[in-house]
Image: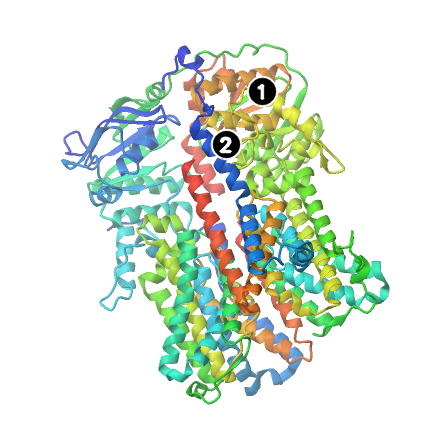
Amino acid sequence: MAADTTAPVILQASGLTKRYAGVTALAGVDFDLREGEVHCLVGENGAGKSTLIKILTGVVTPDAGTITVADKDLTSSTIKERRDAGISVIYQDLNLVQQLTVTENIFLGNEPTTKSGALDKQRMRAEARQLIETLGVDFPVTSRVDDLGISLQQLTATARALSLGGRILIMDEPSAVLGGKELEVLFAVVKRLTEQGIAVIYISHRLEEIFHIGDRVTVLRDGQYISTSKVKDIDQKELIRQMVGRDIEGFQNLDIDAEKGAEIIRLENVTRKGVLHDISLSIREGEVVGISGLVGAGRTELARVIMGMDHFDTGQIYFLGKKTNISSATKAVRLGIALVPEDRRAEGIIPMLSVRDNGALSLVQRMTKFGVIAFKAMFAKVNKLANEMAIKVPDLRDPVSGLSGGNQQKVVLTKCLATDCKLLIMDEPTVGIDVGAKKEIYNIIADLKRRGIGVLVISSELPEILAISDRILVMSVGRIRGEVDPRLTTQEEILNLAIPPMEALTEVGGEQ
Amino acid sequence: MSSSPELLEETPAVHTPAPGPKEQTYKMRAVLQKYALVLVLLVLAVFANIKSEGSFLTPQNIMNVLTQNAVLGVLAVGQTLIILTAGIDLSLGSITALAAVTTLTFQGLGFFPSLLIGFGVGMLAGLVNGLLVSYGRVPAFIATLGMMQVAMGLAYVISKGFSIDDKDHVGLLLGEDKLFGFVPSVVIVWALVTIIAWFITKKMKYGSYIYAVGGNPRTAKASGIPVNRTLIFVYMFGGLCAAIGAILYINRYGNAEPSIGNIATLSMSMAPVVVGGTSLFGGSGGVWKTIVGVLILGVLSNIMVLMGVPQNPQQIVQGAIIILVVFMFAWQERRSRIRQ
Amino acid sequence: MSTQAVAPLKLSDRLVANKHIAIDYMAWILLVLLVIVGFAMKGTLFISVDNLGNIVEQSAIIGVLAIGQFVVVLTGGIDLSVGANMAMMAMICGLTMPFGIFGSVAATLLAGIIIGLIAGVVIAYGSLPPFIVTFAMMFVCRGLALTVTAGESVSAIDSPITAVGYGWPHWAIWLIVAGIIWYILVKTRTGTKIYAVGGNIEAARVSGINTKRILVLVYVISGVCGAVAGMLALARNGVAMPTSGSGYEMQTIAAVVLGGISLFGGEGKFTGAVAGVVFVTMLRNILDSNNADPFWAFCVIGIVLWIAVILRGLIERIR
């Protein structure tokens, strides 16, 4: 590898701290970057990686700490000044204009012109080709971006970052959507860049990759700096041990041994092309099944298929023992399935409507006589549930938009439970929720279990899923990789199952 | 974020502010905002009354204003439901024209058959709009812009471009008689349509669906609300309102011609909806607001007549009012969103 | 420099690539079909010099307006006021004719700029939906056109503008307008910015593009196109009628959509728009002269618009 410990430090950050509304996202984190090295940044969801990136690029101003680039203090500089200092970032969504060509995207907002003011297309193409060559790859620069595979799109974004003269390249989960050969190309490109003295901050969920391309690795956990080590001095087991650690305190899954009831739902070999492969699972009354896995493992997609929001290609779903075609969410709700979606704002609530109107959303279709709503009965039910959940709002007729994340989530739960559902799917139920409300939601889940409702919980937080599940299925690249018993397993074991082996990635690459 | 048991017990104080003086002024402002447009209407009416030397606010003239605006009023009610779903129907004026000429073309069949044919045509046009917007995934303004042309073309084809007289008095089915001696039947029909629409939006499940779909279609879908059926419903209801508007038009003028779809006020049935304060982005507003909007524009146009402004500039004023009002509401909405 | 070969596009990728070609050439394919239909219905008369001349002449005004519409749609917007704007511009040109031909042309162009500026500023800085603003603008323009002369037409029979005549000179002016816009779109930074704003406004903003200014610009371009179309209409008819141009917004949108331009912005070939214009005029030509009720044309164009949008959406959804 190009970098060694003697290469000069090009970026130095120390004591970075950031708080959002009382929650500490980053607490006194130190980070340094040497010329020509690949410095990996790892940590679970919510460990503070994205906050650190946002601070380094100037999107977010830190509450404390300093940043120097090439001995220049840049702590209070703007996004543009950072860019001029050579910091470029390739976000996960790439920020490309899909309909434009590779060349046009590379130079967007920065196009060279001839003396007459017209675009110097020849020069653009030549320079674009040169940039692509610098990356060590070759593809037509005149293609439209949306005609390219995701891998080439990423290389386009990389070329774009380089065209701005970047010396420090931040790659945010560049491999999340890549597989197989595409990964090899990416690794080759990263290696080539470092050979030219460019320093790369590489963020990834996939620990395997770090050992492939990383020189050093820094671990964050819960916004705290944990360690920085040379990749060759550390192994995957130790990395995982550093990433995890915390347990959920103050909550215990007491009924794990309780007798479970009849089967509610059973999936047999459900496959949705390119997304889900051969998924089989079953959930019984009073059972909490946890689904663990990395982002992009297909967990949300699984929830959408069960909810009837996406179709699947092959396989069967049995609901209450009968083979059922869940063709729409409307049908799912009628059957007794409800979903607490991952993105609460986008799919969980209707902001301008009141708390009780939101709570009645799924219930309303069955509380009618000749299409007229039985408001009294409907709101009685919603109010009762809302009170049970202790939603903190002065008046249930107030709009839901003014509530905190935790209380909004309780409104979503009210909506789901008002339908007397038999199966509740919860996708990341505690994201963006404060500690107190989290515990309340765990208690609600425990209560549902006692009432014989089957619960499917999807969560990226390992301590959480370990604390609340009766059994855990681990997903990776669209497949269920294994089932573990939360009493016997460890966070390390789950992560090991969730991290896709290199072969699995190639497999997916071939199928896409 | 280390979680200690103490921290877990601590329930954060969320959204339970004591009603201090600030809260009270906030509430007062909310009330004021709620009735601001009614206030505007009253001020305009009083102004018109002064301008006309006391002849505006007489029962007779008030009925005149209501009668003049009944056709637009019925259309605007239909438009309200559509806009509540964050849609728009540019074709309501044209559907009115089409329904009117069809009804009169078939007037030989008798009152009810011709009436039913008219209603059927209106709802069919609405169905096509609804199918295009829901299952066809065509943007509402494009789908209904197409319908605006199709319905107008058909109206011309059916009538051969001529005005058709209401020989068999289809329109007079409603009767010329006035209820209590002074409430014209067209105003009663308008009131009935309004009450029905209010009942649907506020008391029936499709009303809940409408607000949910307009407020956040993705949440609506994930909550099991039949989004596509709701969209089809509102566009069909809009088509039906246009057909009812057609009958009112025939009742009032005794004939129908295909060009009535081009009448500015009828094509602009979204104007009173927007002026009334229903959000073009969907999910907030209501039928009664639209009625206030219709009356504001109606009184305004009466004032313009009183002041001797000829007919055509009124179009300009209406267009300008829409832009201004939409601008104001968008501004306000954005500000409140930023505050959150 | 050694380069690592990247695997050639997989079959699925190629399909996706062809999907864009299908959209880009949709109008051309449909055009060929339409010519066949034209032949079937009218025989060789269809390609007689006279009839082709008719098509050319009819396409010029719609063509100029469609170019403006095209630029607006590229940003994901829409201009429903083009027809009414054209009528008003014709009136302005006719009324200002006493100030001399140059004064008149300048005044009309200025009016076009102002109309576009108003719509653009309201849309860009008010963050309002373009269809509602331009729909209101349509009534403002129509109302102004009807008001200035109390609904009367303006005669310009003796004015020098009629010297432009009709037929091919119209087409030449269309070509000039089209050429200028083509140059802006394809050859300048501004063109790339227009596409970028329509394609991914966030990426455009991140790249340092002043997106609001671009939005204003496209409506100004559409306004100016309205002015040129208005002058052409005046030159052709010798009179300016306040009610002319109704339904033109529809025809321009149909032409643009048929030409493969996405209503959501960011993509669409210039040539596609041109083919779309020819298609729409040819369709009108066939419908007009086939002894059919002329109003069927309204219905047919409306239905063609629906089909074009749905068809495009279906192709777009191929995965």
- Badge 2 element: loop
Side (left or right) of C280 relative to A155: right
Examine the rendered structure and indicate whether residue B71 appears above or below residue B29: below
- Whether residue B238 is visible to the viewer of this picture, yes or no, is yes
Earlier sequence position, callout 2 versus callout 1 = 2
Q: How many marks?
A: 2
**In which chain is the residue bearing label 2?**
A
Side (left or right) of A14 relative to B18: left
Sort mark 1 into few (<14), some (14-19) or many (20+) by Cα contacts within 10 Å. few
Q: Disc 1 designates what residue?
A: A387
Considering the image in quadrants, where does the C terminus of chain B appear? top left
Question: As rendered, which of C157 and C149 lies closer to the eye?
Answer: C149
Question: What amino acid is at disc 2?
Answer: Glu
Examine the rendered structure and indicate whether residue A77 appears above or below residue C215: above
Considering the image in quadrants, where does the N terminus of chain B appear? top left
- Badge 1 element: helix
Question: What amino acid is at disc 1?
Answer: Asn
